[in-house]
């Protein structure tokens, strides 16, 4: 009996080791293949529900960071919750001003964003192989490097409720600037029409090199979409629509 149980247990162990679930939740923080840099347009975000100004002051009138997600090509899923590396706000004290501008939290009630950053670190950052300071610094540097708002402006694609823009035009403007195709995510905006919501950009494990996405998320957009303005003086979505 014992001679038959041992091979069976061994085979079960090998199957578990090879499972995508374990690959996507590895403990060493290195079992991922690329990053998704996810950039959120706050003008679209604030049409979904009421937004509140952060307690640290208004964010930049620009695309903000939603996340920097390690991703597994094998599982097609984000790599999350790899370990229990501690969170400390002191580790990002030198980055607070930039984070307030470019990785803020517009949820109500008004908040200082710390809970958002802690969640990002505990969920995704611990899987990046970077320390806490490096993780947030890398995300900020990548956002500045791609500069989506400037790339769109070069092609006369600017926030407005008077015009719609082709999704392909938006994709091409960004591709021309960064050398790889972005993924565009839309949401329903004013009058129930689609609007630019998020831009996904794939980055190599080195945290620097923009690459073509090994895994492509499937998002629904119409052929033409709005680029909804973000009004810093009044971030109530109803006021935004009326003001523009």
Image (tube, rainbow, N blue to C red):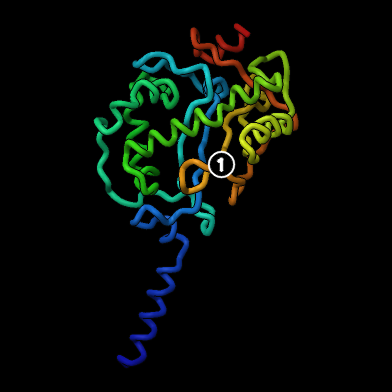
Q: Is residue 155 positioned above or below 131 on the image?
A: above
In the image, residue 117 sits, relative to residue 96, either above or below, namely below
User: Number of numbered discs present?
Assistant: 1
Q: State the residue at coordinates (64%, 19%).
A: 190
Q: Quadrant of residue 195?
A: top right
One can see residue 101 in this view: yes
Q: Position of residue 242 (x, y in %)?
A: 61, 8
Q: Is residue 191 visible?
A: no
What residue do we see at 73% from left, 30% from top? 169
Q: Nearer the viewer, residue 238 or 197?
A: 197
**Residue identified by numbered label 1:** 210
**Image quarter (top left, top right, bottom left or bottom right) of the N terminus:** bottom left
Residue 121 found in image quarter: top left
**With 223 as the anchor, is 101 left or right in this view?**
left
**Left/right of residue 226 with respect to residue 37 in the rendered view:** right
Q: Position of residue 32 (x, y in %)?
A: 46, 53
Q: Residue at x 40, y 54 (%)?
A: 30
């Amino acid at each position: 009996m014992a001679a038959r149980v041992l091979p069976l247990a061994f085979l079960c162990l090998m199957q578990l080791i090879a499972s995508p679930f374990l690959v996507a939740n590895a403990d060493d923080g290195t079992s991922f293949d690329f990053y998704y840099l996810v950039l959120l347009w706050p003008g679209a975000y604030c049409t979904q529900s009421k937004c509140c100004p952060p307690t640290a002051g208004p964010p930049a009138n620009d695309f903000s960071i939603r996340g920097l997600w390690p991703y597994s090509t094998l599982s097609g899923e984000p790599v999350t919750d790899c370990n229990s590396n501690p969170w400390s706000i002191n580790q990002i004290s030198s980055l607070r001003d930039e984070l307030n501008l470019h990785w803020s939290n517009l949820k109500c009630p008004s908040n200082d964003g710390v809970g958002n950053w802690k969640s990002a670190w505990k969920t995704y950052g611990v899987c990046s192989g970077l320390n806490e300071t490096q993780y947030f610094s890398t995300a900020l540097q990548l956002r500045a490097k791609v500069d989506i708002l400037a790339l769109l402006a070069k092609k006369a694609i600017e926030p407005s409720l008077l015009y719609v823009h082709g999704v392909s035009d938006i994709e091409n403007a960004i591709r021309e600037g960064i050398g790889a195709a972005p993924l565009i995510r839309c949401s329903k905006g004013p009058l129930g029409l689609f609007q630019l919501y998020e831009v996904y950009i794939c980055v190599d494990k080195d945290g620097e090199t923009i690459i073509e996405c090994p895994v492509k998320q499937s998002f629904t957009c119409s052929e033409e979409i709005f680029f909804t303005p973000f009004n810093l003086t009044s971030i109530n979505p109803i006021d935004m629509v009326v003001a523009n």
